[in-house]
Structures are given as structure tokens and as C-alpha cells.
Amino acid sequence: MIKTNTKPAPPSDDKRWKIVEATMRRHGYAPSALIETLHTIQEAFGHISTEALAYVADSLNVPHSKVLGVATFYNHFNMKPLGKHVFSVCTGTACFVKGSGEIVEFMKSEYGLEPGETTPDGNLTFTVARCVGACGLAPVMILDGNVVGKLSIEDMKVRIREWLSHDA
């Protein structure tokens, strides 16, 4: 029996899919191109949709469960569109011991945000990271890509309020 590989169609006519296609083609549609392809999708679209996951799985001949597993394992990949600003708090052991859990609770009570949620106005996305690799700066938070650490919990709360008030 002859197996024919038919290339799946991209999820939409959006021209950014040509960039994703070029990444997969450059890597010979090998399963090892998975992470690079997910990075390309993230950069092009800002997040990785379920349709994108299926397209990558079918294009690289990788099980859908593996693609989902990789996309959800790494903190860098976002499965939903992000807000204008992104605030992340590290919940790794060193940060948690130094109070990052209090910051998670603060975001819930002060702003009504659970980890992974975006405000209704699309202004802020709140996330948690299992570890950002900056344990010497614990507790660590990331404000729009800028790592901030070695602050008391109260100083972190003040910094978050100041940071969020800049757009108000």
C-alpha cells in the first residue's frame, strides 16, 4: 500500500500561516520542528489556538496529544490571547517560600484575576510561572517582560499598583 502525504490546509487564509509553513518546510516537516514551529505561531499570532495545534500536529505527523502537551508544558506558550500588559509571578519553590503565593492571592482579591485570566477590557493578563530561573532574586515577578525581584511582599504590591496605574 502506498501512503500519500497530503499537506493539511492552514486554519485560515491569514498570510501569517505562510511564515509558519516556511518554518516547517525549513525543518523538512520533521517532528523535531515542533517547538520551533510553536514559537513561530506564538510570534506571528500572539497565542496558539486549538486550530493551530491541530494544524501543526497534522503537518509534522505528531500526535495531537504530544503537541498539546508541549504547548501547555512550557510557560512561554500562550493558549489564549494576552492582554495589553502581562503580569506574571513565579511560584517556584524559592519564590513561594518567600511569599509569591500572597501575590497570587493579592491579584485575586485586588483585581479579581485568577492565574491565566485577562481583564474584560483586555488591558491585563495575569499568569503564574512554575519557575523563571531567577531563584537568587526570589520572590520574582515579571512586568511586561521585565524581571523584578528581591522585594518584600508589600513592596511588590506597591509596584504592581504603580505599574497598573500608568495606563489608567
Image (cartoon, grey):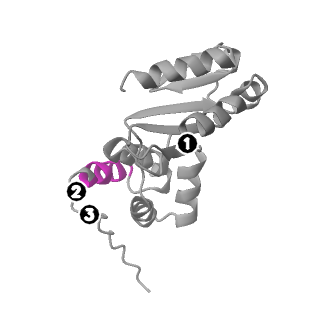
85 sits to left or right of 108: left
Q: Nearer the viewer, residue 127 or 72?
A: 127
Camera-near label (1 vs 2) is 1
Range of magenta residues? 17-27
32 sits to left or right of 91: left
In the figure, residue 129 lies in which quadrant? Answer: top right
- For marks 1 and 3, the one nearer the N-term is 3
How many other residues sit within 10 Å of disc 2, few (<14), some (14-19) or many (≥20)? few
How many other residues sit within 10 Å of disc 1, few (<14), some (14-19) or many (≥20)? some
Q: Quadrant of the C terminus?
A: top left
Q: Which of 134 and 120 is in front in this view?
A: 120
The residue positioned 51% from the left and 31% from the top of the image is: 87
Tag shown at residue 12: 3
SS label for mark 1? loop
Residue 124: percent from left, percent from top:
44, 37
The residue positioned 45% from the left and 25% from the top of the image is: 164
Tag shown at residue 14: 2
Query: What is the CA distance from the residue labelled 1 to the residue labelled 2?
Result: 32 Å
The residue under label 1 is which amino acid type? Leu
- For marks 1 and 2, the one nearer the N-term is 2
In the figure, residue 69 lies in which quadrant? Answer: bottom right
Q: Name the residue under label 1.
A: 113
